[in-house]
Image: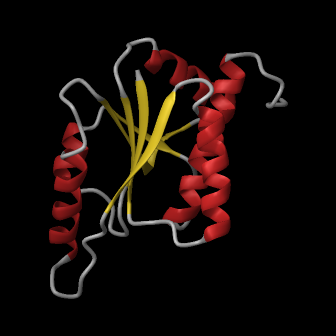
Amino acid sequence: MEIKLIVVGKTKRTELSKLIDEYIKRINFYCRFKIIEINSAKSKKISEEEIKKVEGDNILKNLNKNDILILLDERGKSYGSRKFSEFISSKTQTNKNLIFVIGGAFGFSNSIYEKSNDLVSLSSMTFSHQIIRLFFTEQLYRAFTIINNHPYHND
């Protein structure tokens, strides 16, 4: 079982990259985890729908047939940290790879929504894609510490 976070674009801020890398290292103590960056298709020459389609196709290229696809989407279900850890625990019991995706600036194509197994919202607020990577990796690490009774999380 492996967990991947597919993201559109790159993290340009060195300080964010260092923090994200620290959480990746911590998560890998509990399971194999990696971030896959795909290129943004953002261009003034093509429409938002075409951008979402190109990015969606690039996301799909990174999926296997049995992967569980979970989109980080503002319309998804919101969890507190304990409930999110239960969600992660239940999904890891399947022994299938968990693939979380942060979409591009315009969101996801319909083909990605159709393939998804779940939608998870980290907040109803809008954050930059770079910040969401940090928030997600910290919450995933927190979920594993809760699952494993590590004293990182306080209620």
Q: Is residue 83 left or right of residue 9?
A: right
As drawn, 129 above or below 36: below
Q: Which residue is at the front of the view, 97 or 104?
A: 97
The reply to whether residue 38 is visible in this rendering is yes
Q: Position of residue 42 (x, y in %)?
A: 28, 76
Q: Position of residue 95 (x, y in %)?
A: 38, 14
The reply to whether residue 124 is visible in this rendering is no
Q: Position of residue 46 (x, y in %)?
A: 15, 81
* The N terminus, quarter of image: top left
Q: Which residue is at the front of the view, 118 or 1?
A: 1
As drawn, 115 above or below 39: above
**Which residue is pictured at 49% across the width and 16% down the height?**
90
As drawn, 147 above or below 129: above
Snapshot quadrant of residue 149: top right
**Which residue is pictured at 51% across the width and 66% down the height?**
11
Snapshot quadrant of residue 39: bottom left
**Which residue is pictured at 46% across the width and 41% down the height?**
34
Q: Position of residue 106 (x, y in %)?
A: 32, 68
* The C terminus, quarter of image: top right
